[in-house]
Image (cartoon, rainbow, N blue to C red):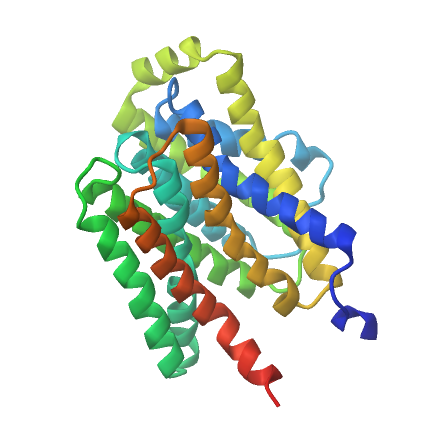
Amino acid sequence: MGTQHRALPLSHLALALAVMAVWGTNFVVIKAALAHLPPLTLALLRFTLAFLPLALVLPRPKVAWGNLAAYGVLIGAGQFGLLFTAMRADITPGLASLVVQSQAFFTIFMAMRMTGERIATYQITALLLATSGIATIALHTDGSATPLGLTLTLLAAASWAGGNTVSRAAGSVNMLAYVVWASLFAVPPLLVMALALEGWPAMRAGIASADRWTWAAVIWQSVGNTMFGYGAWGWLLARHPASQVAPLALLVPVFGLGSAALILGESLPWWKLLAFALVMAGLALGILWPRLRKAAP
């Protein structure tokens, strides 16, 4: 397995970039679907289609039902339920793609809580940089992000981090099958939340008014993000060290902010670019510094 430490072949690098492009531009796709569908209804449809029909051909991974349930609730009702709700009217797609990446810090601190490891100086610096970027967003009131939208997106990031912690506890599994079967447990809480908070008349009206582009966006949530995204990402992680593959995830907000500006015309004033630079600097420091220090002579 010594070849694992070689540079990524160009074809594998292209595949990784394609996954980042899909995950980054998906924020624009989400916004398109929200034009017709209530947010919790959209999340409900996404995870229903993520479970079926793939569950009919993918065997359930050999992990505890409780682990699958925890992941499904955290990612389904937590991450995407909250994120879609925020993106309906309280945060723009570009900023959502950036702020939700704070999950990296939530994940680190949850892991530290479990292991008792103390926070390092570089991690404090990284957190301060990213927090400064999010504070920059919060201080500007041009409608790009409301306090509610920012709070919901940060809670979505924390839920994502909780899902990361749960999936790591599952050990080495087929990630695509894991996500598919965990989606089963995302459906009931999303259905209850949608009925309670949006109501059946709004859900029915949204589904009735959905055009072909809306349904294409819904299907893309399942096919593009789940089947292709998680499948390809898991395939890459199985063939290369995480230290080579994981840093490429920093490109998600690049694609997110860029596609929102190009496709939706989202403005990029100086403060958004400053917030982007601060958050990305914090993420890069938190992810890359241990590897750079280890590689240094």
Q: Residue furthest front?
A: 270
From this view, report whether residue 77 is shown above or below residue 163.
Answer: above
**Residue 182 or 24: which is nearer the viewer?**
24
Residue 124 visible in the displayed image? yes
**Most extreme residue toward the bottom, as rendered?**
297
Taking the image as shown, residue 89 lies to the left or right of residue 163, namely: left
Q: At x 66% / y 36%, what residue is drawn?
A: 55
- Nearer-the-camera pick, 233 or 18: 18
Residue 204, quarter of picture: top left
Q: Up-down: is 261 above or below 198?
A: below
Q: Is residue 119 visible?
A: no
Q: Position of residue 261 (x, y in %)?
A: 41, 35
Count the labels in the image.
Answer: 0
**Residue 181 placement: quadrant:** top right
Q: Position of residue 284 (x, y in %)?
A: 47, 66
User: Residue 199: horizontal and vertical position, in percent?
Assistant: 29, 21
Q: Can you tell which quarter of the image residue 278 is in?
A: bottom left
Image quarter of the C terminus: bottom right
Q: Residue at x 59, y 40 (%)?
A: 226
Identified at 65% across, 39% down, the residue is 227
In the image, residue 188 sits, relative to residue 233, either above or below, namely: above
Q: In this rendering, is residue 20 above or below 31? A: below
Q: Position of residue 74 (x, y in %)?
A: 42, 49
Say which of 202 and 61 sits in front: 202
* Quarter of the picture holding the N terminus: bottom right
